[in-house]
Image (tube, rainbow, N blue to C red):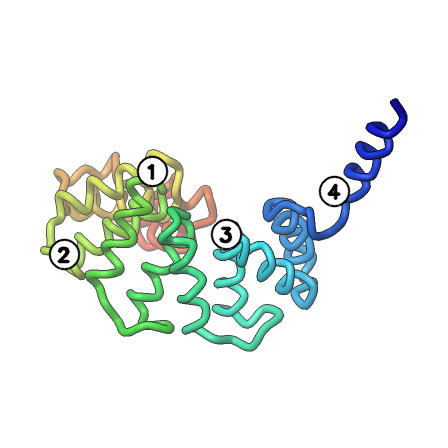
Amino acid sequence: MKKPLFIATALSLFCVLPSCETPEAIYNSAQSHYTAKNYDTAVPLFKKAAARGNTDAQLMLGKCYDFGYGVRKDPSEAVVWYTKAAQAGNADAQINLASCYYSGAGVPVSMENAVAWYKKAAAQGNAVAYNNLGLHYLNGQGVEQNHAMAAEYFTMSAQMGDADGQYNLGKCYFMGLGVPQNMQQAQFWVRKAAAQGQQNAAMFMQDNNWQ
């Protein structure tokens, strides 16, 4: 009767070894160090969790290479990790990868690819992706210009509480782009954005003498 107890105890001790840590546990530890700006400690942990398929770790490792946190800044390597996470369905990574294609950071500029990745994130209900798609449709970048579609995306973003989406929707109502011109709606949405600290919204209110 004692032998099974010994085996269970041995297995229990074995499973607390570092090699048995889950990717999620490793990521959580890395994120704590990252938040504390202990990047030299965070990066190896992000790498460990990322290698085991944790998409949040892949995203954060991309950010570290993107901004040079704990590693030498390397936009191309950032794209590698953003892509891994984005292809696995991580919406934040999809947005960051889209931004890379938009700006040409680590990849050639491609508005079409930027739109494609924003759409994948938007399909997951991401407010930032809605806003950025609105900008692409507003300006005709990677898609045919369509002000009504832009206003629709801004509306979805704004209703989810995104300050940039609120500001852009307010401007659409102010200028009558994609929606009927409506000063009351313009003020409503711009005020919401300004209340969240959106600086362009605050300046817009000041320029139009909106108290």
Residue 125, labelled with which disc?
Answer: 1
Callout 3 amino acid: Gly
Label 2 and label 1: CA atoms lie apart by 20 Å
Tell me the element at label 2: loop
Of marks 4 and 1, which one's residue comes earlier in the chain?
4
N-terminal of the two: label 3 or label 4? 4
With 197 as the anchor, is 132 left or right in this view? left
Numbered disc in front, either 4 or 1 = 4
Q: Position of residue 100 (x, y in %)?
A: 35, 66
Sequence order check, earlier mark of 3 and 1? 3
Q: Amino acid at mark 4?
A: Cys
First of labels 2, 1 by sequence position: 1
| Image quadrant in which you'd find residue 5 | top right
**Mark 2 to mark 4 CA distance (whole Å):** 52 Å
The answer to which of marks 3 and 2 sits earlier in the sequence is: 3
How crowded pointer 3 is (Cα within 10 Å; few <14, some 14-19, many 20+) is rated as some
Mark 2 belongs to which amino acid?
Val
Judge depth for marks 3 and 2 and give the one in front.
Answer: 3
Q: Which residue is mark 4?
A: 15
Image depth: mark 3 or mark 1 in front: 3
Q: Which mark is drawn over residue 53?
A: 3
For the residue pair 123 and 85, the one nearer the viewer reads as 85
The disc label shown at residue 143, or none: 2
